[in-house]
Image (tube, rainbow, N blue to C red):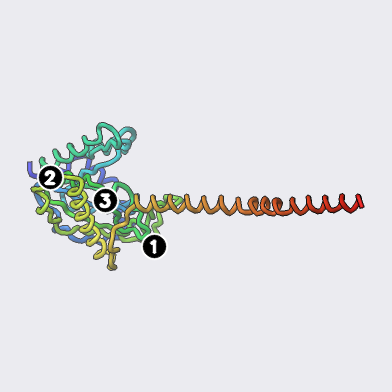
């Protein structure tokens, strides 16, 4: 099987989702020629809005090669969303369980069957303050090395204008009408890694190569230079925690300072009072 048929459930999802997307948003789609016409492949996509999976899925659907997303297992369990996730053949990810590797095996199997598997290598919405891709996780790299399938970097921008990430209220900001921009780049050249043992260092190097390709496409899409280094969320959290500990320590020290000063003053006054009392007693004796 060289490619997966779109199928009933994907067509139903398109019937439901495409009309509002067409009406509410403008589109700027680039690089569709880089999406393989046949055979299994991987797309690696940046993530900066809760809305951007719909933006990317719309783009990918129109290439005729529908993606299978890796998504949280909880989305498959109930309701209409779960029905659609199962019907369209998305791949559940069981995080931090003994079944966590199942998703990667399913991804490898899908690619060998000629399907497209879409990864969000960051694993969550970017925490970068300027919404550039942050440091990625190694799942896409593992599957890429196992399958040697083409890895297509996909950048997207604009959905974040309609639904900013981490906003207090997850409300659509539809006016003025936003443009959903999606751009696919040429396959990432990973051939230098294919004959190497997939150690942690190799997987990190492959992941960084993929993330650099996504960032390059996003810089072209945004028309501005990208940061020299990707945002390291773990390092940023560690720095924030360290700063918080130091601030708390300084606050405790500041709060303790008046008490220490009062104690020191009391310690200095007490001998003086004692001497004054002794002097008074001596004067009475005279």
At mark 3, the secondary structure is loop
Distance CA(mark 2)–CA(mark 1):
51 Å
Looking at the rendering, which quadrant does residue 94 occupy?
Answer: top left
Q: Nearer the viewer, mark 3 or mark 2?
A: 2
Distance CA(mark 3)–CA(mark 1):
33 Å
Q: Is residue 145 left or right of 237 when viewed as pictured?
A: left
Looking at the rendering, which quadrant does residue 99 occupy?
Answer: top left
Residue 54: x and y in percent read 29, 50
Disc number placed over residue 176 in the picture, else none: 1
Q: Is residue 91 above or below residue 25?
A: above
Q: Is residue 205 left or right of 174 when viewed as pictured?
A: left
Residue 52: x and y in percent read 30, 52
Disc number placed over residue 136 in the picture, else none: 3
Indicate which disc, 2 or 1, sits on the residue closer to the N terminus: 1
Nearest the eye: 157 or 147:
147
Check contact, mark 2 vs mark 1: CB within 8 A. no
Residue linked to disc 2 = 197
- For image coordinates 45% across by 53% down, the residue present is 243
At mark 2, the secondary structure is loop
Indicate which disc, 3 or 2, sits on the residue closer to the N terminus: 3
Badge 3 local density, few (<14 within 10 Å), some, or many (20+)?
Answer: many
Q: In this figure, what is the number of numbered marks?
A: 3
Q: Nearer the viewer, mark 3 or mark 1?
A: 3
Check contact, mark 3 vs mark 1: CB within 8 A. no
Say if residue 70 shows up in the picture. Answer: yes
Q: Is residue 44 above or below residue 97?
A: below
Nearest the eye: 206 or 62:
206
Residue 191: x and y in percent read 9, 53
């Amino acid at each position: 099987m060289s490619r997966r048929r779109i199928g009933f459930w994907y067509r139903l999802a398109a019937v439901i989702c495409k009309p509002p997307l067409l009406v509410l948003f403008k589109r700027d789609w680039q690089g569709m020629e880089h999406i393989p016409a046949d055979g299994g492949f991987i797309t690696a996509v940046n993530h900066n809005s809760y809305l951007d999976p719909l933006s990317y899925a719309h783009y990918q659907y129109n290439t005729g090669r529908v993606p299978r997303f890796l998504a949280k297992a909880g989305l498959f369990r109930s309701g209409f969303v779960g029905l659609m996730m199962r019907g369209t053949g998305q791949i559940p990810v069981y995080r931090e369980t003994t079944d966590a590797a199942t998703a990667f095996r399913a991804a490898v199997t899908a690619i060998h069957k000629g399907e497209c598997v879409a990864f969000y290598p960051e694993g969550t919405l970017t925490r970068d303050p300027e919404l550039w891709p942050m440091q990625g996780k190694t799942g896409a790299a593992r599957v890429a090395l196992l399958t040697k399938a083409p890895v297509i970097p996909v950048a997207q921008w604009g959905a974040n204008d309609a639904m900013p990430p981490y906003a207090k209220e997850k409300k659509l900001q539809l006016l003025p009408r936003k443009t959903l921009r999606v751009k696919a780049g040429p396959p990432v050249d990973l051939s230098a890694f294919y004959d190497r043992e997939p150690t942690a260092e190799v997987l990190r190097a492959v992941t960084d190569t993929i993330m650099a390709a996504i960032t390059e496409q996003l810089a072209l899409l945004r028309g501005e230079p990208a940061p020299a280094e990707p945002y390291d969320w773990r390092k940023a959290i560690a720095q924030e925690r360290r700063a918080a500990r130091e601030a708390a320590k300084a606050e405790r020290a500041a709060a303790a300072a008046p008490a220490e000063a009062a104690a020191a003053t009391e310690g200095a006054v007490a001998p003086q009072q004692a001497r004054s009392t002794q002097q008074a007693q001596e004067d009475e004796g005279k």
